[in-house]
Image (cartoon, rainbow, N blue to C red):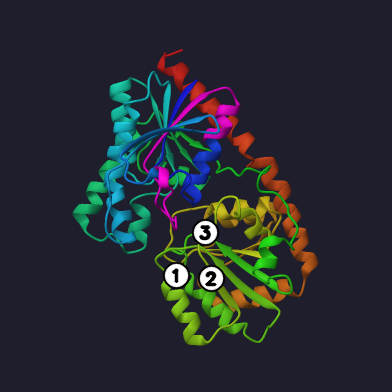
Amino acid sequence: MNIVLLSRYFPPEIGTAANLFYELARQLVSLGNRVTVVTGFPWYNLEEIPAKYRGRLFMRESLDGVEVVRVSFPLIGPKKVKLALGHLTAPVSALLAGLMVKNPDIVYVYSPPLFMGISAWLLRLFKRVPFVFGVQDLHPQCYIDQGVLKNKLSIAALRSIERFCYKKAAAITVHSAGNREYIKNRGIDESKIRVLHNWVDTDDLKPLPRINEFSKQHDLNNKFVVGYAGTLGMSQGLLSVIEAARLLKDRKDIEFFIVGDGIEKKNMIEKAREYGLDNIRFLPMQSKAVYPLVVASCDVGLVTLNKKVKTPVVPSKILSMMAAERPVLASMPLEGDAPKLINESECGLCIEAEEPALLAEKLRALADNRDKCLKMARSGRDYVVENFSLKKVAMDILNIFTDIIKDSGRK
């Protein structure tokens, strides 16, 4: 099968979208398929852009048997501006690069950005192949919930584009039942909406010693480490973590370790300085090679969302903590799909969003009960291996592709 994957992000960029698509592409190749990833040039979450990518607008390369076609428009300005402009330029780049792929059988597109669905639809017209719309974040709903998107005309326009992409896709994949219900309620035939859980490479992200080269480097071995690794964005509600750290100043055995970048990082650092906290440290995003050691260096992993989040999101860092055999403490709206997963797998605890006093209370209890932490950690590892391993989910998506190609009459 000749598969085309469209994604705004791809390694050497660091982050969930980049790693998910890289892992999926590599696994599909190992199953005997030809895979071409259509993407842009790397810049996001990189301290320095590798020399081979600088000053170029087009490039072909091969990574672990995956053909990568890169087309990009130069983006200038601060990070926030580049991110916003990328929502418009990345789909154009994806279309141009996708047109260069010969004889594809199917196109799978990662959203957001929402407009990537338009690129996939145009490739469907030009290449006469079906496309599958892989929905990670429900746009524009998540922006509406956060109060970022308020203009009624803009909302109506984006709603129309969202519905158009859903209608034109041969199938839609979502990572939870709640997301399927949301899209069904947008007037979309439920039969075309498939729950495809996010995956984690359980061979790559596996239990590692708590004391390792990363923990030694950052002097984490004599503390109960509360770790957060990921985006420090507007929807995470991370200032409540700073408040919890303030409430735990008396516990010299508990330390917070924040690894990541995002628009809230500056506010978090300033608030920690204001409180004079010496029990919380910050590091930039780490590479995929280092990430397993980051997770292994935690005694409990934090996953947070703010109270405004209404979509039933399941943050991928939950699966990472489970795969690494570390317990999860989640602070988020309790009506979503993530709390259901945590409760069903018994991998950790879940409390209401933005409740720093309760968060501090639960952390005290976990620090005083290491046996409970160990039990939850083992339950999480067993559950994720059985249900969310990369090998299993890759076969699931390959079966979806096979059914769609047969229905389209291509083979």
Which is nearer the eye, 18 or 379?
Answer: 18
**Residue 110 on image: x %, y %:** 42, 40
Residue 88 lies, in percent from the top left, at 27, 46
Q: Residue 265 carries which label?
A: 1
Question: Which residue is rendered at x = 25% and y = 61% of the image?
Answer: 150
Amino acid type at circle 3 is: Glu
First-in-chain label (1 vs 3): 1
Q: Is residue 36 magenta?
A: yes
Work out whether 100 lies above or below 296.
above
Name the image quarter holding residue 92: top left
The mark tally for this picture is: 3
- Mark 3 is surrounded, within 10 Å at the Cα level, by few (under 14), some (14 to 19) or many (20 or more) other residues, namely few
73 in magenta: no
User: What is the C-alpha distance between the residues marked 3 and 2?
Assistant: 30 Å
Q: What stretch is highlighted in magenta?
A: 25-52
Quickly name the residue at label 3: 335
Tell me the tag on residue 282. Answer: 2
Does the residue at mark 1 contact the one at mark 2 (Cβ under 8 Å)?
yes
**Residue type marked 1:** Lys
Which comes before the other along the chain, label 3 or label 2?
2
